[in-house]
Structures are given as C-alpha cells and as structure tokens.
Image: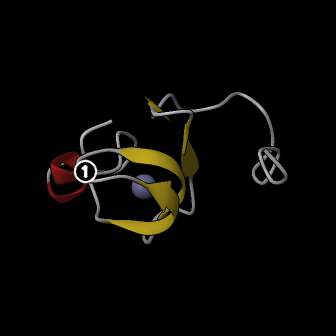
Amino acid sequence: MFNYLKELIVCPKCKSNLSWNTISQNENHIINADIDCNQCGQTYFVKNGIGNFIIDFQPKNSFIGV
Ligand SMILES: [Zn+2]
C-alpha cells in the first residue's frame, strides 16, 4: 500500500491514531507492517503490500506471528 496512507488512516473501529511498526517498505510502498491502535488496542497489518484494516472476529493478538 502507498506509504502516504499512513498519515490518513485512522482506526476503523474507534477513529483514533494508529501506531505503525513498519517491517519492510520500498520507495513508495509499505510491504509489511504491524499496526496497533493507540486507543482501543485493535491490531491490523500490512502483508505483501496489502493492508488489512478489517476488524477481526477473533480474540485480540490472534495475528501475532503473521
Ligand atoms: Zn481503535
């Protein structure tokens, strides 16, 4: 996903700012990242350039290790 989106995306769940832990990126794109919501603790991720901002139906932290 385009890295400028980092500045635009807020938590879909609570609309708060997100904390980005970028794992890999190139000039314009984020390839892999872990993303945490500062407010509600919901986690998201970017994997292979695709951002996943869907609120998961599984217990928190189920995505660790992805
Ligand atoms: Zn949130």
Q: Nearer the viewer, residue 39 or 4?
A: 4
* Total marks in image: 1
Q: At 42% from the left edge and 54% from the top edge, which residue is drawn?
A: 25
- The residue under label 1 is 3
Residue 34 x %, y %? 57, 57
What residue is rendered at 44% in x and 72% in y?
Answer: 38
Residue 54's place in the image compared with 15, above or below, is above
35 vs 1, left or right, is right
Residue at point 81%, 54% (across, down): 64
Q: Does 63 sit above or below residue 49? A: below
The quadrant in which the C terminus is found is top right
> Does residue 24 lie above or below 51 as drawn?
below
Most extreme residue toward the front, as rendered? 27
Relative depth, front residue between 26 and 62: 26
Examine the rendered structure and indicate whether residue 48 appears above or below residue 11. Answer: above
Q: What residue is shown at x 24% (from left), y 40% (from top)?
A: 2
Mark 1: secondary structure: helix
Mark 1 residue crowding within 10 angstroms, few (<14) / some (14–19) / many (20+): some
Query: As drawn, is 57 to the left or to the right of 62?
Result: left
Q: For ligand 1, which image quadrant applies? A: bottom left
* Rendering colour mode: secondary structure
Mark 1: is the Cβ under 8 angstroms from ligand 1?
A: no
Q: Position of residue 21 (x, y in %)?
A: 51, 69
Q: Position of residue 6 (x, y in %)?
A: 25, 55
Q: Picture coordinates of residue 48 (x, y %)?
A: 56, 33
Image quadrant holding the N terminus, namely: top left
Q: Amino acid at mark 1?
A: Asn
